[in-house]
Image: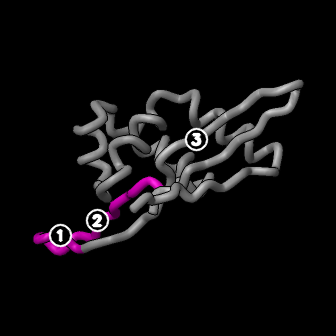
Amino acid sequence: MQVLDHVFKIEDSSKKDNILEIVADKYCRAILDTTMYKPKSVMEIAIDAKIPLSTVYRRLQSLEEQKLLWTSGEINEEGKRMFLYKSKIKGIKCNFNRGQIEVEMILNR
């Protein structure tokens, strides 16, 4: 049985620019990669991706603004609320052809 990827084409030019900025940022790419299959806390992301904690917080804000992350919460053993983040995308396809940029996101289902 073949599983087809769900692809979403971005039409808005400013949204395309924002997505391309995220793809160009190594920290955003690392966060999307480490959260692709399992939701993770900020601390888990920082450790797994080897990114400073302050950088993780800043990049998470950018990724959330572009709606590229699912955010959920849970309460840990100490009773503190902890947010978990998971990538909404598995990949991004970009094509530059005759002055036009096409951007498609492969959704993470």
Alpha carbon separation for disc pair 2 and 3: 29 Å
Asked whether 28 falls inside the magenta stretch, the response is: no
Label 2 crowd (10 A; few <14 / some 14-19 / many >=20): few
Inspect the image, locate mark 2, and give the three-letter code of the amino acid beneath it. Answer: Met
Label 3 crowd (10 A; few <14 / some 14-19 / many >=20): some
Left or right: 79 in relation to 65 = left
Query: Mark 2 — residue?
Result: 82
| The N terminus sits in image quarter | bottom left
Kindly state the secondary structure of the residue where label 1 is placed: loop
Asked whether disc 1 touches disc 2, contact meaning CB atoms under 8 Å apart, the reply is yes
Residue sitting farthest toward the left: 77
Kindly state the secondary structure of the residue where label 3 is placed: strand
Kindly state the secondary structure of the residue where label 2 is placed: strand
The percent coordinates of residue 5 (x first, y second) are 52, 55
Q: Which residues are magenta?
A: 75-88
Query: Mark 1 — residue?
Result: 76
Determine the image quadrant of residue 55.
top left
Task: Identify the residue shown where x is 72% and y is 31%.
Answer: 95
Alpha carbon separation for disc pair 3 and 1: 33 Å
Label 1 crowd (10 A; few <14 / some 14-19 / many >=20): few
Task: Identify the residue shown where x is 49% and y is 41%.
Answer: 59
Asked whether 81 falls inside the magenta stretch, the response is: yes
Inspect the image, locate mark 1, and give the three-letter code of the amino acid beneath it. Answer: Asn
Vertical position of residue 33 compared to residue 95: above or below: below
In-front residue for pair 100/70: 100
| Comes first in the chain, label 2 or label 3 | 2
Task: Identify the residue shown where x is 79% and y is 44%.
Answer: 14
Q: Nearer the viewer, mark 3 or mark 1?
A: 3
Query: Mark 3 — residue?
Result: 92
